[in-house]
Image (cartoon, rainbow, N blue to C red):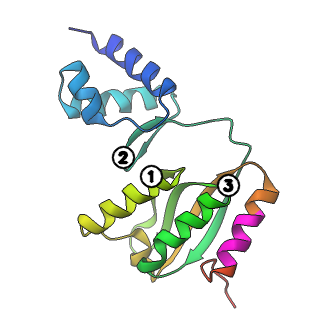
Amino acid sequence: MLSGVERRTQIKEQLLAAQKPLSANFFAGQFKVSRQTIVGDIALLRASGEAITAAFNGYLYRNEQAVFTGKIVCKHTPAEAETELRLVVANGGQVLDVTVAHELYGELTGQLNLTNNQEITRFMHNYRTKQAHLLSELTAGVHLHTISCTDAAQFNVIKAKLADAGILYSAD
């Protein structure tokens, strides 16, 4: 049986090599420990400065080499959420998170880390089958996304596509 330090080292190595998020359940099965033990391991790795982020479908090592990140403000109905996400990805972006300004709790942020259509399909399937609610439903559809892409020009293309679809928020 591995020590906690050895287990965390292996978790870090696997996350660094992974091409997709890896779940706490995956690691728990591999190391024959509880899911909660893995959640604690991840928390310790993050507290020590590791760039690990949690997505809806597992953990991944954050790519620190993203060339450009920016924030966009969107407003749409829940029925338009999939269109929004697919427009970002189709135009070279990655949807890192979603943030809303809640009247009671202040800023609430959910990690998404959606980088391709397969991940969007899985996210939307989970949203529909779990009868969950989008954070944007708390704020009448208004929300922010952090978008990662190659450069500012690509970011502007993404914004233009969202504006054309009536999804980019405008105060006008």
Local crowd at mark 3 within 10 Å, few (<14), some, or many (≥20)?
some
Residue 110 in view, yes or no: no
Residue 14 placement: quadrant: top left
Q: Distance between the Cα atoms at labels 2 and 3?
A: 21 Å
Q: Name the residue under label 3.
A: 92
- Circle 3 sits in a helix, a strand or a loop, which is it? loop
The alpha-carbon separation of the residues under discs 2 and 1 comes to: 9 Å
**Residue 115 seen:** yes
SS of the residue at dot 1?
A: helix
Q: What residue type is labelled 1?
A: Glu
Name the residue located 25 percent from the left edge and 22 percent from the top edge.
Answer: 30
Circles 2 and 1, Cβ within 8 Å, touching? The answer is yes
Please state if 96 lies on the left or on the right of 135 as rendered.
Answer: right
Dominant SS in magenta: helix
Q: Residue at x 29, y 35 (%)?
A: 24
* Image location of residue 66, percent across then percent down: 68, 41
Q: Residue 42 occupies which quadrant of the picture?
A: top left
Q: What stretch is highlighted in magenta?
A: 156-163
- Counting labels gives 3
Q: Does the magenta stretch include residue 126?
A: no
Q: Which residue position holds label 2?
A: 57
Give, as a three-letter code, the residue at label 2. Answer: Asn
Q: In this picture, is 136 found above or below 107?
A: below
Mark identifier at residue 30: none
The stretch drawn in magenta includes residue 161: yes
Label located before the other in sequence (2 or 1)? 2
The three-letter code of the residue at mark 3 reads Gly
